[in-house]
Amino acid sequence: VEEQRQRGKAVPLKTEASQAVLDVGSFLLDKYKAHMARWRAPLSTAALRKREKRGLPPVPEEYGDLVTVTRYWTPVRENALCRAFNLAKERARVRGVEIPKKATFRDLRHFADAVLVASGLEPRKVQARMRHARLAETLDTYGYLVWEVDWENAPASFEELYGIAAPAGLPEVALTPRAERERRSSQRPR
């Protein structure tokens, strides 16, 4: 990720933390290659003439490195993603899946953040995955989920995870360092 698009125009990323290399699995890589082969094949002279007749400009070189483009070789805009997401929600509802009417495409990102935090993943790792500039941004937004963490299986105690004293009200296991929990569980009779 080297740039972002706003209203179809390239603009700098918000922060240096936003710049990232996104690892993809072989399944997604194969889909990407098929997408690129379909949409990046050079246009025939007939297709270029057709574009010209419709009043469309030839394919702009500035869009040559974009991963997703429309059929008109322009950047995909947010409203197109939102329309596609709304269609997908409707298809899911037809199959009986309950999805809130007000759920948005952006909510998928918030859902992923929330699942990572609530599962007990270390906040610094969540911050890195979501490319937040500061840990405080991650904790301010998703800190309330700390109380929903499965502390029995969390990778560390609250203090180990967050580097600050635990607030009142957390279960005892959230206050116990992981090494101590592992020591106690190994001493239990089986």
Image (cartoon, grey):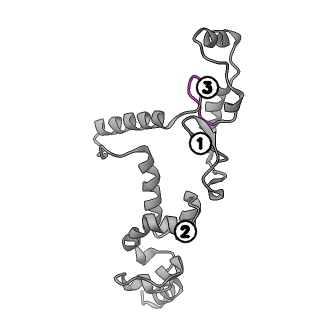
Q: Residue at x 39, y 69 (%)?
A: 144
Which circle marks residue 68 in the picture? Answer: none
Q: Position of residue 8 (x, y in %)?
A: 57, 34
**Which SS type dominates the magenta stretch?**
loop
Q: Position of residue 21 (x, y in %)?
A: 67, 52
Q: Nearer the viewer, mark 2 or mark 1?
A: 2
| Marks 2 & 1, CB-CB < 8 Å contact | no
The relative height of residue 174 versus residue 55 in the rendered view (above or below) is below
The relative height of residue 116 versus residue 73 in the rendered view (above or below) is below
Disc 2 and disc 3: Cα gap in Å?
38 Å
Q: Which residue is mark 3?
A: 73
**In the image, which residues are magenta?**
67-73
- Amino acid type assigned to the residue bearing label 3 in the image: Trp
Q: Is the C terminus in the top left, top right, bottom left or bottom right quadrant?
A: bottom left
Disc 1 and disc 3: Cα gap in Å?
22 Å
Q: Position of residue 73 (x, y in %)?
A: 61, 25
- Amino acid type assigned to the residue bearing label 2 in the image: Leu
Assess disc 2: are there few (<14), some (14-19) or many (≥20) residues with their C-alpha within 10 Å of its C-alpha: some
Element on which disc 2 rests:
helix
Q: Which residue is mark 2?
A: 135
Reply yes or no: does residue 98 show up in magenta: no
Q: Which residue is mark 1?
A: 28
Q: Nearer the viewer, residue 145 or 23?
A: 145
Disc 2 and disc 1: Cα gap in Å?
29 Å
- Amino acid type assigned to the residue bearing label 1 in the image: Leu
State how many labels appear: 3
Element on which disc 3 rests:
loop
Assess disc 1: are there few (<14), some (14-19) or many (≥20) residues with their C-alpha within 10 Å of its C-alpha: few
